Image (cartoon, rainbow, N blue to C red):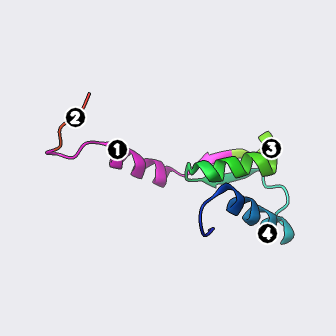
Amino acid sequence: MVHNEQTADYIWFFNNLREVGFENPETVIADRNKAQFNAIQQFYGRRMHIVFCWWHIKGNIINSLPRKNEEIDF
């Protein structure tokens, strides 16, 4: 979606969306990228409903779990 996935890059993207007619979306689907979340809050304010993508959340959970032969560090 954007080149560097920085907050400024997402704001640039949202500005371009606005220019082509997507002025006030009610919902944004996000992948929990902090820069994306910050840009949504800065650009749209708190009125935006953010839905986190289940595919990305599931992948993050799987990647966070220890592997079969990996020790658990408590």
Q: Which residue is drawn at 80% across and 44% down?
A: 45
Left or right, 36 with reference to 67: right
Spatial separation of the CA atoms under disc 4 and disc 3: 17 Å
Judged from the image, the secondary structure of the residue bearing numbered disc 3 is helix
Task: Return the disc, 3 or 1, that comes first in the chain's sequence.
Answer: 3
Q: Name the residue under label 4.
A: 16
Whole-percent x, y for residue 72 in the image: 22, 34
Q: Residues within 10 Å of mark 1 (few under 14, many from 20)?
A: few
What is the span of residues highlighted in magenta in the rendered image?
50-69
According to the image, label 1 marks what residue? 64
The residue identified by callout 3 is: 45
**In front of the other: 56 or 66:** 66
Q: Residue flagged by tag 2: what amino acid is it? A: Ile
Residue 15: name its quadrant.
bottom right
Secondary structure of the residue carrying numbered label 1: helix
Please count the marks in the image.
4
Please tell me the numbered disc located at residue 72.
Answer: 2
Residue density around tag 2, few if under 14, some if 14–19, many if 20 or more, within 10 Å:
few
Q: Position of residue 66 (x, y in %)?
A: 25, 42
Task: Report if the CB atoms under discs 1 and 4 are less than 8 Å apart.
Answer: no
Amino acid type assigned to the residue bearing label 1 in the image: Ser
- Judging depth in this view, the residue of 29 and 12 nearest the camera is 12
